[in-house]
Image (spheres, rainbow, N blue to C red):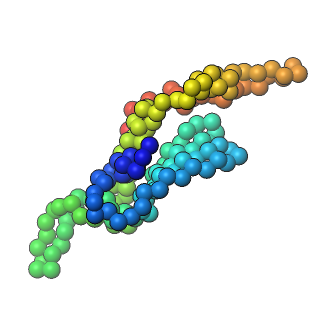
Amino acid sequence: MNCTDVFRFLGKKLTQNFHGEAVSDYKQRPAGCRVKFRLGKNSIKSYDKSNCLRIETAINDPSVFKVYGEVHYRDGTTSKQWKPMGKSICNLYRYAEVARASNNRYICSLQNVIPVKGTQKEIQQICAKKTESGKTYTGLQWGRCEKAELSDWE
C-alpha cells in the first residue's frame, strides 16, 4: 500500500496543493498487531482483537469532509449546498457515513493483498486444534471473521 491508498481510504484526492503528511504506522503488541494510516488529524487503523480483525476510522478534523446543509449569508438569504463538516451533534449521521465508506474502501483494498509464500500453511497450523498431555487446545477461530461478508459492514 502506498500514499495514494491512504488518500483513497479517507475519501480524498491527492492534489499538488496538499501540504500535509500521509503516515503509515505498524506496531506489534502482545495482543496482536496494529496498522494505522494517518492523513492530517484523521486516521484509519486495523488491529487484531479477540482473534478478529477490527477496522476503525477516527475523524479528529471533520472540516476536510463535506456535509450538505443550509448556508446562511450576511444579507439574510440561505441556500442549500455542500459545506465543511463541523464538530456538531447534528452532523453525527455524516460522521457515520464517512467512517463507514472509509472502512469499506479499506476492506475492499485488503482483498487485493497477495499473501506471502507459505502463509496459508502457517494459518492452517495456527487454526488447527492441538492436543498436549491429554489437554485439547482450540486454534485461532478464523471462521468467525472469515464468514463476515462485505454486506455486513454496510
Quarter of the rendering containing residue 14: bottom left
116, 48: nearer the viewer: 116
Left or right: residue 57 versus residue 66 is right
4, 142: nearer the viewer: 4
| Residue 93 appears in the figure | no
Give the image location of residue 19, x and y in percent: 35, 66
Give the image location of residue 143, x and y in percent: 57, 25
Residue under the point 68% across and 44% down: 31
Left or right: residue 140 versus residue 91 is right
Q: Quadrant of the C terminus?
A: top left
Q: Quadrant of the N terminus?
A: top left
Quarter of the rendering containing residue 61: bottom left
Residue under the point 49% across and 52% down: 24
Residue under the point 28% across and 64% down: 17
Residue under the point 65% across and 43% down: 32
Quarter of the rendering containing residue 51: top right
Give the image location of residue 97, x and y in percent: 35, 49
Give the image location of residue 83, x and y in percent: 24, 64
60, 95: nearer the viewer: 60
153, 76: nearer the viewer: 153
| Residue 71 appears in the figure | yes
